[in-house]
Image: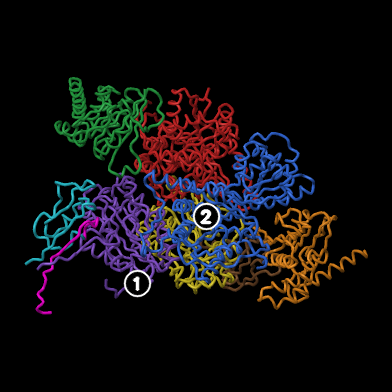
Chain colours: A red, B blue, C orange, D green, E yellow, F purple, G brown, H cyan
Amino acid sequence: MTKQLLKGNEAFAEAAIRAGVEGFFGYPITPSTEFLEYMSRRMPELGRAFVQAESEVAAINMVYGAACTGKRVMTASSSPGISLMSEGISYIAGTEVPVVIVNVMRGGPGLGNIAPSQGDYFQMTKGGGHGDYFPIVLAPASVQEAIDYITLAFDLAEKYRSIVHIVVDGNIGQMMEPAELPPMRKIPKEAPEWAVTGAKGREPNILTSIYIDPVDEEVVNIRLLKRWLEIEKNEVRYKEYALDDAEIAVIGFGTAGRVASSAVRAAREEGIKVGLFRPISLSPFPKKQIEEISKRVRRILVVEMNSGMMLEDVKRVVQGRVPVEFYGRMGGVTPFPDEILDEIRRVDSNTADVADLEREQWLDRLEARIAGGK
Amino acid sequence: MTKQLLKGNEAFAEAAIRAGVEGFFGYPITPSTEFLEYMSRRMPELGRAFVQAESEVAAINMVYGAACTGKRVMTASSSPGISLMSEGISYIAGTEVPVVIVNVMRGGPGLGNIAPSQGDYFQMTKGGGHGDYFPIVLAPASVQEAIDYITLAFDLAEKYRSIVHIVVDGNIGQMMEPAELPPMRKIPKEAPEWAVTGAKGREPNILTSIYIDPVDEEVVNIRLLKRWLEIEKNEVRYKEYALDDAEIAVIGFGTAGRVASSAVRAAREEGIKVGLFRPISLSPFPKKQIEEISKRVRRILVVEMNSGMMLEDVKRVVQGRVPVEFYGRMGGVTPFPDEILDEIRRVDSNTADVADLEREQWLDRLEARIAGGK
Amino acid sequence: METSIIISGFGGQGTLFAGQVLAYAALHAEKHVTWIPSYGPEMRGGTARCTVIVSDEEIGSPLTRNPYAVVALNLPSLDKYEPLVQSGGILIANSSLINREMERTDVRGFYIPAAKIAEEIGNPRLSNMVMIGALLAVDPVIPLEVVKQSLNEHIPERHRKTLTMNFEAMERGAVFVQETLLTKKSA
Amino acid sequence: METSIIISGFGGQGTLFAGQVLAYAALHAEKHVTWIPSYGPEMRGGTARCTVIVSDEEIGSPLTRNPYAVVALNLPSLDKYEPLVQSGGILIANSSLINREMERTDVRGFYIPAAKIAEEIGNPRLSNMVMIGALLAVDPVIPLEVVKQSLNEHIPERHRKTLTMNFEAMERGAVFVQETLLTKKSA
Amino acid sequence: MVMEKVVYQRPESLTDTVTHYCPGCTHGVAHRLVAEVLDEMGIREKTIGVAPVGCSVFAYNYFNHDYVEAAHGRAPAMATGIKRVRPQNTVYTYQGDGDLASIGMAEIVHAAIRGENITVIFINNAIYGMTGGQMAPTTLAGMKTTSSPLGRDVELTGYPVKMAEMLSTIDGAGYIVRRSLHNPVNIRKAKKAIRKAFETQERGLGFAMVELLSSCPTNWKITPQEALDFIENSMLPVYPLGDYKVHPELAGLRV
Amino acid sequence: MVMEKVVYQRPESLTDTVTHYCPGCTHGVAHRLVAEVLDEMGIREKTIGVAPVGCSVFAYNYFNHDYVEAAHGRAPAMATGIKRVRPQNTVYTYQGDGDLASIGMAEIVHAAIRGENITVIFINNAIYGMTGGQMAPTTLAGMKTTSSPLGRDVELTGYPVKMAEMLSTIDGAGYIVRRSLHNPVNIRKAKKAIRKAFETQERGLGFAMVELLSSCPTNWKITPQEALDFIENSMLPVYPLGDYKVHPELAGLRV
Amino acid sequence: MPIRGRIEVNQLHCKGCELCVMACPQDVMALDMEHLTPKGYHPAQLVAEGCTGCAICAIVCPDAAITVYRETPQKTRATA
Amino acid sequence: MPIRGRIEVNQLHCKGCELCVMACPQDVMALDMEHLTPKGYHPAQLVAEGCTGCAICAIVCPDAAITVYRETPQKTRATA
């Protein structure tokens, strides 16, 4: 296939269809609505299930039910909608059925706005729902990655009987870029053996997340955790740029990482030895890779479109080996490359101890920047 | 007042009443239902509002509405119910109205069971809802602390216009202990100036969490974050035991911390120089205190009733100064002191590098223990 | 000094109340005390159990794997807790419902025909108080008199008419133990 | 080489489509390209804007604070972007709707009576194509011929009848710029 | 010579697991009727049940066919998901009044609005059983529960909600009836209704719900027989039995 | 000498803020009527409004009294919370059809069940406006929307939901009517209904809802006047105007 | 001659709720107060002659614990 | 003599939706195609004699943009 100019949300949706999604259940919410709209046209066309649910609560529980049949199913929503799905997500995790969920994140908390944000990092990676479970979280940063990682998402979900979240922001959803769609996959005729399909000639299958005896629940928890440790070993994904000889490492995911790459390139042109690490799997978090980087560089700058969430994971991994600084924009503001370039320059020449005050220091700089009209 | 023998859930509820709660909105869910039942009797008796809502979704939005009037209001629920409240919680945070929420945590994920658990640590401390917000999270470990901290919770909620979560587990809720209730507080007649009470002789008050222009939302995000940094400075709370000369520090909250205190006492009797640090404010996390401890001890053991959640925060703070080990029970299993004593003995004599494998190593030990019938 | 007691039996045998009687008495005696019921799926399994810990110091865990004393009002309770009682601890079995011998030889074991005694007093629901009386006779964790005073103060009004019966049940349990001890000694 | 272009105007002026035409052409020319519309509250404010970045290398940020070229179809767009165009960059203003002078002297500024030209062609909706033609005449980021080929391939079928008009609009825009340049040189 | 025939035996669609229901609880009757209908229709092997949260949370242990366990109130949404991707299966939910009429109100109403081809067995026993006897939306006026200790005050909590009446106003509903389980005659009628509700699904006639007046001796704090009497004397006047909506195509169906 | 009197002027209960509604959108008419009623009843200074998520999300900017902004669909729950702790205030929600009839179904039904003393203004324009024209539960059969691109298929998505009819079956409802905003006569009737709905609250007669058939020229993709014609010709037959439930104590009320 | 029937009560499932006893039209059932089921209930049983195999007991039984049998007199083949 | 009225259209609020124009029973309103409001709309206006101050335009106006006046002839005090 050759490259086409594709819009993020639509490429996402079409890629899901080609990956064999047989059920889409969703509710309109900006900026993910185009996903649902695309599906409302394409799914019936292909004889597949599409339901505009009465709410996100219903949508995730439709997904939950459909997933129990062993078919590839998904939903797409945006921050408040994901919050409404929290209970269902925890049930899906506890029942160990594969589900793919796309979150086109927007500014928050609360109703907030519809602009691009990364403020759901914690909700997505640490589990917004109750109890011990471990979702896979992938953060593509381009239309091509959106296509590639939603395809992967279905495979991983099935392989590990896990939830896979895809998190992007409105920038990725709205952008057009040249990208290549994979061919349409054949839909398997056979359901997995654990699925509910009618107990024809076999013992009934029961799918549940209740284990009333704590001893039994602990067995499940151990199984989930061991599976997770497997996932942590096998499924870390990331992109690096110019890190080989870097003295400064910038770390950012999704749009923030992508914007940072422009700043890194510009900084390189100024002779600053800076490189970029862009986690794609936010969970499992690229612990080993960042640990290695922290042994090679002088300083790390974390860039996010939130108040410093991945920052915490980076700091946990870096273990104080080098100072970790932070730059973020919030509330739906996408940083421009020049802001990050300024930060890279500053970090490059900074030798001071950060002393766990990286957020305080950043806030001062941010407020000065805003006061300066940028 | 003298001490009475009080049951956790009822002491909690009565203390909330004495702290001046004027509205309780909830939905039955084990093991927090007694809270609602107690309120269903006491609140109408006092002419205060009690509504058994149609769901947790409705309950939190009733709380949200009532909080907008400036009155002290609350709900109590349990893990899956809290998940259903995620959206409302994020709205409350974004609207900056004070609310107290009690979570009597149970085994999960999903429906799980009703046994005591700490599996919602991430959900509570990192924000189960979407967007950048920072709830205060308090974890009492006795009936007296339940009383004291729910009183404090209302004060903090009001002071910072913040959400205050109180997290306990069924052990605390079901336990009877001698404790002292505070006197009944007078309910203030005046509403705060930001509250909606009818725009009589003043400009209308509007309470909302929507800031459609990212620039405006960022202002809110900065305000919330600065307020949070204030809270981090002022509102850290914890209990210490035998840490002065300790070479080993055990860190655990709530029931796990309390059970650990028995083990620590027993270990001391064996001559092991071990002490206990029990965070009460899980958020703000006692960063400085644990940092200090990590400079004094040889090794740290984190004990939780989950798969190792606070562990991540501890590791982030300890920054690799000393090895951090982990012991947890999951799925509603409450550890006995002897298990933790075994762990303390083991940690005391362990000199090996843990190398970020503390969970893998713990799982091996846990499975051996379970196989051994303990 | 920390003393852990588990009282276990069928639902309806008054195990939770018996534990509360001890807990109130401990409070009365100005001791630290925790009372915690069995909680979780067992609530629905027809068993009712509580753990009472009485201590001179602040109490850590309200639960214990190896209790110092066990009051077993039915057979499943004996089966479950006999192996767990601390060596040198106390195991009191309701012989009205339990017809097997204890296997442990390193604990102080007693058989109390609690139901029979309760019926003799005229209230079959008092087995629990008989057993408590027996326990306190073996080890007066809290003196019986304090328990009585405390019960007098905390008994729900609707049950006040049974107060003396409760006293009698405890006394009869205590007497039974003392007689057993005498027998044992003489044996 | 990375070229960033912002096309900005009222909703209905075809700014998003004009950007897409450039993006398709860039793809046609085997360049890296991103197209991103204004997104957020501005969508509701009556303005429509897109950013197109064309590059020989992989593109990082699809957004830029300081574009190389700005095509301003209305006055608010000129007001907003004139201060932001890179020094030495391009600023093309639709003089049919904009009646103020540019203030920047360090950019290559052009006034195109796009609406007038479009009306002359017979389709007032083609202002956007006139402006694109003008832009490409100032700097052929993508050669006009490639843009035409690409438009021929990607124009929606229902609009195919307007294809030659589109071509003409671009050509007229380009010619207008060339004439302006001649005038300037001769001035 | 005298031979013997089996007049009644445990249906194949029930497992041999002993239920956790209290003695005399009519959940068991409802289970049995559903199982008998599945047997009689010969659809056990293609049936997928959806269990609720509430006393019947463990329904999947008692039915001998595929089962999933829903989040509280969301069984109709879960059933929708299943039915939409596997229309060849028979899908039903089994829900109590807290589940269906309180927290699950939106899901049941919208399943009916969509005319979802699923069957709903709705157990109305006027109380929350599993959590220990709190007020339900179906609790009778004045009835004491652990969360209405002085009796349900209709001024503050409203009147009992009538789901069959309400759902029958919805176009997508194909079969909406109320039956009772308080005596043999009514149990027989209930079974016929359950049969019709499954036939509705098999014929693609839309959403079907059988509301069953049911007892909760434990939380009502009376004996099983008294509980049946309570249904007859106190619930029937508030919840009239009847056919609230029957799709014309079902009119001639004899079961 | 000829004097001039003001026959109509902008009500005090509206602010001077220009609405973000599209030209000809009848949200504005509904706003105006509510404001006029609050003025006439003299209750502006004790009124608290609850805005929904949907096109009227910014209602609080346009009304000159206290306002809160609810989560999507939860306005009745939020209003309940406010009314319960401040019964002395007048509390109303203003909700669209996605908000009230889709995601907020449980909350509106239960507010009615509880007989919550609140007033609900329900704008039924058969579409999701804010997110750009998706199908609502109230969308007419066959109507094209961005999520029913071939027209609403009632086999898959069900028939339009009739909230007034459904809620009128609930005991706690005190005043449930449907009106329309498509011409002056109906606008006058709508205003009277809004007045009665607020009077219902002032008299403590329970839950009150006025469903208003409303237009969405932008997403229906027709002119404002055509949109009013669409209400008359296409919506009225599906959504009959009328009084679905009127508390007896309101019967004699002249407004 | 009246129709004769009998029942078997499954001891595993019977919870002694007595609904069958109350419903039996022949009044020939009672709980067996001498025995306990494995779950600790007094099970229902036939206590007198007169069972017609009408199955009312089974219809009201919440635990599907009752199997009902009825005699079917073999007809002579004369008419065959 | 017919009742005489007039209207004022608030240029800030009017969005030129034309509903008042369509509704005017006297047919004396039209959009002012010569002018734009600050928001960019052609506002409604009276374009002919005959306004009775009936306020129908105000009743249908979604933006409460219209103020309606009506002449009230001063009565002579004779009857007072």
The residue closer to the viewer here, B357 or G10, is B357
Q: Is residue A354 left or right of residue A40?
A: right
* Residue with the mark numbered 2: B81
Give the amino acid at mark 1: His
Q: Quadrant of residue C158?
A: bottom right
* Residue with the mark numbered 1: F247
The residue closer to the viewer here, B249 or F112, is B249
Q: On screen, C26 above or below E88? A: below
Chain letter, disc 2 residue = B
Q: Quadrant of residue A105?
A: top left
Residue B26 falls within the magenta-colored stretch = no
Q: Residue sitting at 58 percent across and 46 percent down?
A: A132
Question: Residue F59: image x %, image y %?
Answer: 33, 55
In the image as oriented, which residue stretches furthest toward the bottom? H79
Q: Which residues are magenta?
A: H59-80
Is residue B26 in sight in this rendering? yes
Packing grade of label 1 (10 A; few <14, some 14-19, many >=20) is some
Question: Residue B84: image x %, image y %?
Answer: 49, 53
Q: Quarter of the image containing the N terminus of chain B?
A: bottom right
Question: Residue C38: image x %, image y %?
Answer: 67, 59
Give the amino acid at mark 2: Gly
Q: On screen, F93 above or below C149? A: above
The residue closer to the viewer here, D56 or D95, is D95
